[in-house]
Image: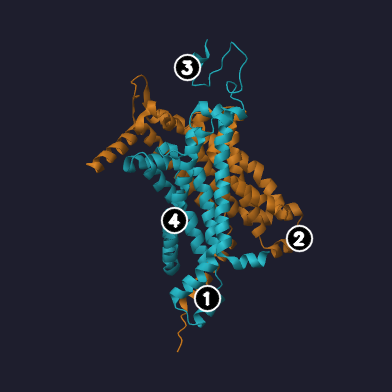
Chain colours: A cyan, B orange
Amino acid sequence: MSIDLVIAQGGGFLTDRTGPRTCVQNDGFCPDWIFDNFDLFVDPTIEHVYLTVVSVGLGFAIAFSLGLLAHRRRWLISPLTWVTSAIYTIPSISMFLLLLPLTGRGNVTALVALTLYTQIIIFRNVVNGLANVSADIVDAAAGMGMTPNERLFRVEIPLAVPEILAGVRIAVATTVGLAALAFLAGAGGLGTRMSTPAQLTFKSNVVVAGGLVTLLAAVLDLFVLGIQRRLTPWRRAVST
Amino acid sequence: MMIMSFLGTFGDAVGFIFESKESRAGTVEVGGLSEIGDLAWNHVRVSFLAVLIAIALATPVALWLGHVGKGEFAAISVANIGRAVPPLAIIAFFIAFLGTGFTNVCFALILLAIPPILTNTYVGVRQVDRELVDAARGQGLSELEIVRRIELPLALPTIFGGIRLSSVNVLATAIIAPLAGYSTLGTPIFAGQVYGLSGQIGAAMVVAFITLTADTGFAGVQRLVTPKGLKLAEGGRRSSRRLRPTSTRRVQLP
């Protein structure tokens, strides 16, 4: 059986019984294959970053606004928490598929679902972060003649930044994981490299795709941590 | 027009759950309550087993670590790593390096279920008032009795919070199991060319229903296992929070 025929039949994954089996035919871990085929992973990685950044950014804008609103109108906290956590309970794969008839295959469906999933995480941390600001400090700000809005933007929000951004970090890690399933919504991402049995049994492929997803979560997490350190220089001064 | 078309899709999906029909190629019968029931049973069975084993492995370790107050760094690291490694990546690594089938799927799901249970149990025990533990020790309770009769009951709501989160995660991840050669409700979703869009959406609906039911059920259990004293304390704390001066008092300057 010629090599061409083997490739034509098995897409490169079929084992050739006639000669000594190569690393790729063994589904092994082959640095050469990874080096030669790395461009297979570039576009999925870019799509993955795009899905994560856009949906966490959008999710932050919505959840932060809702959090500020609920901070002023506290009766809103429990219904908003209930709705967002019910959404979070629905498996992401179900959500992608249930949205398909409404928003069609592609980025929109994936972005809507991923944005919805960030809500509970960021909303909860915004509300808790603002509630945990010391009452004495807020009183002192009021005593200095600050209006409620000034207090919110110049005292409460800055002091709540660490807890709010802790929420964003969890949201980033979660979204990277969920975006790995966005291929079901037709939105690409690194999940496309882990979506068929042939891809999943091929060790080289799994190591690169799974490794990139995990690495992406870590890198984006460090990025948000960097933002946090820039926004709260007083904490850095204390901790070092 | 558009509204009709998506109602039609959802209608077809509901139809798929209750009545079998010809597959897209017209070669086999797919869908219907008996097939969906079998798949749902497979799905729940592997998830239940995985969570049960995760509880058996994680809670004793975390209870003891929490009791002696060691391993805080480890408990938090496990939580962070558990969150950072995506479920699909865990499943993919298991398939590539350990193979497919029920046992391997179950192992991957156990690995996924352990972090929330471990962390919540640890945190739950650490939250218990140390003075209470000292009082129990003063009354002559042994260390094991303190864990069993003081720390465990007071930590139960938090522990069940972890079990609840794990169960939801595991039920959601079991959808990927067909890629590892074990048939679950993910089968219609990943074999879209056989089951069609209505099959995919129908299965998605059933999984969402199971997950929401499990979550609601565990929330109920969580309330049931909360000791009366804790509920009272919680009520007290909540009312005192409402009295926080920041939201009510307005200082006017002359």
Q: Residue at 59% across / 10% down in the picture?
A: A18
Task: Name the subunit of mark 4.
Answer: A
Q: Secondary structure at mark 1?
A: helix
**Amino acid type of the residue that numbered disc 4 sits on in the rendered structure:** Trp
Determine contact: label 2, label 3, CB under 8 Å: no
Asked if marks 3 and 1 fall on the same chain, the answer is: yes
The nearer-to-camera label among 4 and 1 is: 1
Residue B17 vs residue B251, the one in the foreground: B251
The nearer-to-camera label among 3 and 1 is: 3
Residue B49 can be seen, yes or no: no
- Residue B137's mark? 2
Q: Distance between the Cα atoms at labels 4 and 1?
A: 28 Å
**Amino acid type of the residue that numbered disc 3 sits on in the rendered structure:** Gln
Q: Quadrant of the C terminus of chain A?
A: bottom right
Q: Secondary structure at mark 4?
A: helix
- Please tell me whether residue A142 is drawn above or below residue B237 in the rendered image: below
Asked if marks 4 and 2 fall on the same chain, the answer is: no
Asked if marks 2 and 3 fall on the same chain, the answer is: no
